Amino acid sequence: MADTKYIFVTGGVTSSLGKGIIAASLAKLLQARGYKTTIQKLDPYINVDPGTLNPYEHGECYVTDDGAETDLDLGHYERFLNVNTSQANNVTTGRIYQSVIEKERKGEFLGKTVQVVPHITNEIKERIQLLGKNGEYDIVITEIGGTVGDIESLPYIEAVRQLMWELGDNNGIVIHLTLVPYLSAAGELKTKPTQHSVKTLMESGIKADILVCRTEHELSDDLREKLALFCNVKREAVIQSIDASTIYDVPNMMLHEGLDTVVLKKLALAEKAAPDLMRWNQFLDRHKNPKDEVHIGLVGKYVELQDSYKSILEAFIHAGAENEVKVNVEYIHSEHITQHVLKNKIAKLDGVLVAPGFGERGIEGKIEAIQYVRENNIPFLGICLGMQMAVIEFARNVLNIKDANSTEMNPNTPNPVIDLMEEQKDITHMGGTMRLGAWDCNVQANSLVAKVYGANKISERHRHRYEFNDKFKGQIEAAGLKATGLNPETGLVEIVELPSHPWFVGVQYHPEYKSTVANPHPLFVAFVKSALQYKKNK
């Protein structure tokens, strides 16, 4: 019998049903029962990782401590479980094929013809079992991206079929997430799409053990019986997943439906104690019953797609609950910032966050927004590019270096206050070559950020190529913008703050990646608190 049990989550009918949230919610319940659980995501696209994908294509790129650029679902996994993920938690078709081709070039297949079966499927099985090999986890949940029936997903489905056979009884199960649509003209829920989806899965040799049905309306007992009968699952294994007001409701909803109980039974695992969700529910209570509210502007250039800033939005939810306030995020497109927007929109906000991003589009708008909040004492947080824009704005409008810029925007600027990092200058390949993952930072004693963290040494995750140019550090600090966080090895400026301002902080790293339900990020907590204070003082 295998030591580690495996759960596979597949999707049918349509994409964006929330496989990641269901996987994370189930993992939360199993973890709350005392089982060591992790989740991985298999992505069917041919990119090696999402690092080179436009945010409009794929939403945000999430970064792990070990420097993996991954799918945004890994953010959900960490936020729900409060456990770090790694390179092994996200696998793409591109990475699978790259690995197999490298092995072929080295002659590892001894002259055999390299084929999808067995070579690609073997590689997939190896990656799936990587997390379970060292005995660190009792249960590994594997979410398979895309929809059953997609050409791209076929090798993954075949690998799961083989693995289910190899694992033997009670060591692996398949949860199929599907849609039960409501036809308003007929006034009823329809099961046929789910039946077809399950049939497609069975044609690939896989039987669904559990059905999780996304729905806008309650599933009647008759409908559950029908689904059980025609989809060949037990009645107790038809789980309803009705639309929720927040993703953080889903673990409780799945608990109520008995998803974790059915899973443990099918894996022949003891139920142990009832799930301990006390801390989770305390967070939910604060989130749903705020005592006040604040309005914070998110200035960015991908604001049309909320998933582009997923971790930032979730960090605001965590920080809002911690402060018992509702954070209303107002999206401001940095390409459309005018004097009218500054005076009629930004002026009314309680705080402004200038978001990360790449390229020169919308840059001047970010700089104008930062100038306005700096001059009008509105709480400010700049992340990555947002921090760099704060440095450029200060150099232009306080030091009067009107042509100050970043070499990312203007390679020939005479005053590159932001410049390409030294080790980046000879790099030609764009994928996976940025400064990535967790790096240490020494925080200046008595600085605002030292008080926020309650520590003088921190570690945060990065994703950037450009940095604060040390040649301008003396000048900028003398004028009042202080570099209060430095990397101990390279001297890279990680944090800038303006002591003359009530709350003005720019960070080169991405604090949003480390905010979880159990541990809201201190920077976001302090920023939201300052926004509330600003609102009360207005």
Image: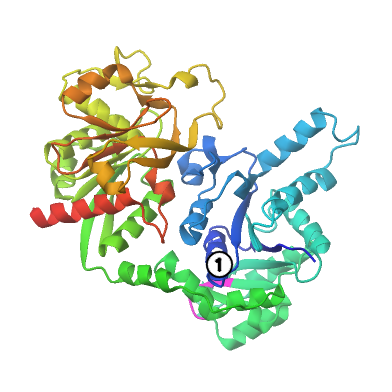
Depth order, front residue of 76/278: 278
Would residue 36 be seen by someone viewing this image from the given angle?
Answer: yes
CA neighbours of label 1 inside 10 A, class few (<14), some (14 to 19), many (20+):
some
In which quadrant will I find the N terminus?
Answer: bottom right
Would residue 186 be seen by someone viewing this image from the given angle?
Answer: no
As drawn, the residue found furthest toward the left would be: 538
As drawn, the residue found furthest toward the bottom would be: 222
- The residue tagged 1 is 31
Q: Is residue 361 left or right of residue 83?
A: left
| Residue 526: x %, y % from top left | 26, 51
Task: Give yes or no for residue 483 being in the magenta stretch.
Answer: no
Hey, what amino acid is under mark 1? Gln
Residue in the picture at 16% in, 19% down: 400
Is 235 drawn above or below residue 515 in the view shown?
Answer: below
Q: Is residue 25 left or right of residue 96?
A: left
Q: Is residue 475 left or right of residue 436?
A: left
Depth order, front residue of 350/526: 526
Is 507 drawn above or below residue 493 in the view shown?
Answer: below
| Residue 41: x %, y % from top left | 61, 52
As drawn, the residue found furthest toward the right would be: 111
Q: Tag 1, which secondary structure?
A: helix
- Report the magenta residues as a range: 213-218
Residue in the picture at 29% in, 54% down: 525
Is 413 drawn above or below residue 251 in the view shown?
Answer: above
Depth order, front residue of 350/491: 491
Depth order, front residue of 14/255: 255
Task: Give yes or no for residue 214 being in the magenta stretch.
Answer: yes
| Residue 46: x %, y % from top left | 65, 40
| Residue 404: x %, y % from top left | 26, 19
